[in-house]
Amino acid sequence: MCSLRMVRSHLRFALLLTSLVSARGQVQILHGPTEFLGRDASVKQLTASARGSLERGDLEGARSILERVLSREERNKQARLALTDVLRRMKRWRDAADQAQILVQQYPSDTEPVYLLALIAMQRGDPHTARELTGDCVARGDNRPEVYKVLALSDYLLHDKANFESKIESILRKNPRDAEAQYLLARYLFEEKRYGEALNRFHTVVAIQPDHYKAYYYSGLIYNANGDRENAQTAWMTSIGIVERKQAVYGWPFADLGRALSDAGETDQAIEWTSRGVRNDPACPKTYYEHARAIFQRRPEPEVKRALLEAIRLDPGYADAYYMLGRYYKKVGEDQAGDQILDRFRDLKAHPVPSPYGLPRQ
């Protein structure tokens, strides 16, 4: 099999885990009116408003309301779990951990707060602590699949691959239709360059969960590496269709589809898809890079420079973006700027900087 453009850093699997709050600890927020929440609003009204804020994606609004609930009911477990989740999603790791520690103190026999601390540790890049905490959960009888997933992922990040695979396989023996566990195993196989096995697992994922756009994306990478352009493009377009229907933010399939079209000489289509990718995921440096590359293939327009500078701003170690920017400057007659940028490119090639996104730059 042709080599793939592989993930440069270890798995960022923690970002792919199941929802932070398990069914056992899920917040029971009722639907209801969200307006006119004055000082005398009831806890029921506040929780309804928090639910509305979450459904709108207003994390700051939800945080503020949940803190109001807890100011009245300090031991409202569901509200504190929800607040921990919101803070985690806002990447306020320390604040999220503080809330989870309060839960540990209030409910010392409950493993749910310990699991939350493990998940936060994983997302902060501390697999040692995550493994210790999930190990404690298991020792106390908490055998939920999501606990085992964090434990397995911490094993992988600590280079204990045998334990990772055995734990995920154990989860799947109990529930073969656990789509997220299937996906985690597929990603592991992908990164281990066991591409045939990975593709079979990605197929299993979409058979269980047909709207799993990430599984389609990675299937497309494997097809493309095998020279199967038609199936690669079909997989990426399926992924994009799901992303746009669900209003998800995920620019990778747009970028890779655009690159494939650009390489095939279909420049106008490539630019159209990469433009959509930039609009979908303005924080993804790869979409900007592929957009610039497609345009540059046609001619050195100013948009090439703008897109490459944005890619570099988002990912300062993006060596290929520097190389193309240097070529752009040379092409438009700005030789001094081009030489400076190409010097930076050579420095990055000699001393690579890992992508902050844990995914292939190219």
Image (tube, rainbow, N blue to C red):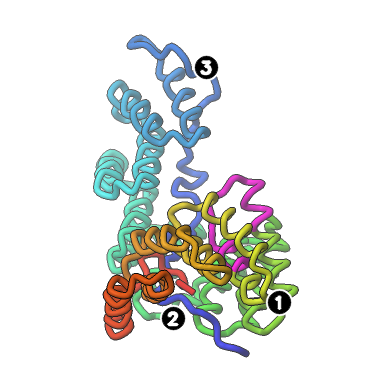
- The residue carrying mark 1 is 229
Mark number for residue 140? none
**Which secondary structure dominates the residues rendered in magenta?**
helix
**Sequence order check: which comes first, mark 2 or mark 1?**
2
Label 2, label 1: how far apart the Cα atoms are: 32 Å
Q: Secondary structure at mark 1?
A: helix
What is the x, y in percent for residue 206?
A: 69, 63
Residue at horizontal 37%, vertical 11%? 38
Which amino acid, by three-letter code, is at mark 2?
A: Lys
Compared to residue 180, the image places residue 161 above or below, namely: below
Q: Which residues are magenta?
A: 240-258
- The residue most toward the bottom is 1
* Viewer-nearest of discs 2 and 3: 3
- The residue carrying mark 2 is 161
Is there any visible trace of residue 135 in the rendered image? no
Q: Secondary structure at mark 2?
A: helix
What is the x, y in percent for residue 13?
A: 45, 65
- The residue carrying mark 3 is 33
Residue 118 among magenta residues: no
**Sequence order check: which comes first, mark 2 or mark 3?**
3
Left or right of 13: which side holds 189?
A: right
Which amino acid, by three-letter code, is at mark 3?
A: Pro
